[in-house]
Amino acid sequence: MDGQTETTRNTEAAQAVVRGVSRLMRNLGETCLSEFTLKTGRRVDIIALDRKGVFTVVEVKTSVADFRADNKWHEYLEFCDRFYFAVPMNFPTDILPDDCGLMVADGYGSEILRDSQPGSMNAARRKALTLRFARAAAQRLMHTNDPPLGVIPRIDDSNP
């Protein structure tokens, strides 16, 4: 299989997992954003916020190679209260760390197989992240409702 076909397949699988996780989060009463940029410049696959102000970060992995090549997910832990890996149904979950939450998902839904270990953020980081989340969500909605004329909107929420 050529590289472009493999990349396309992984992208489609990742989109399906994101959709399934987003549906689960909505059913749990949480709101989420995908491709959210943290203050550090790192971009998380999914970040969710519940009614109590608890943040969940979900890192999507679609292949063993994707997981093994990623060393940045540790940097997300200080920006959430819960952390999960979300993978497709056929992913070999035994290679994932036992101390992280685990979800399996497809384009229709997701299931939590292992709960996340609770984390905590200090109050200043929580406030800053909440404001960043709110501004990113509002900016995305604003671009959806009124895109700039003659421009294909590219949402850059790296500095909301």
Image (spheres, helix red, strand yellow):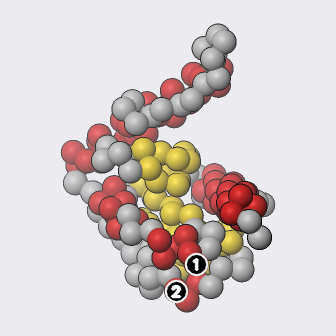
Total number of numbered discs in the rendering:
2
Query: Where does the image place residue 137, in percent across and percent down from the top left?
Result: 51, 34
Query: Where does the image place residue 158, in percent across and percent down from the top left?
Result: 40, 36
Q: Residue at x 40, y 81 (%)?
A: 99
Farthest residue toward the front?
2
| Neighbours of disc 2 within 10 Å: few (<14), some (14-19), many (20+) | few
| Neighbours of disc 1 within 10 Å: few (<14), some (14-19), many (20+) | few
Quarter holding residue 80: bottom left
**Quadrant in which the C terminus is drawn:** top left
Q: Is residue 136 above or below residue 47?
A: above
Identify the residue under disc 2. Answer: 95
**Quadrant in which the N terminus is drawn:** bottom right
- Point out the tag, 1 or 2, that comes first from the N-terminus: 1
Q: Are marks 1 and 2 in contact (CB under 8 Å)?
A: yes
Q: Is residue 30 above or below residue 58?
A: above
Farthest residue toward the bottom?
94
CA gap, disc 1 and disc 2? 8 Å
Is any part of residue 11 visible from this angle? yes
Q: Residue at x 69, y 68 (%)?
A: 105
- Foreground pick, 81 / 104: 104
- Foreground pick, 65 / 12: 65
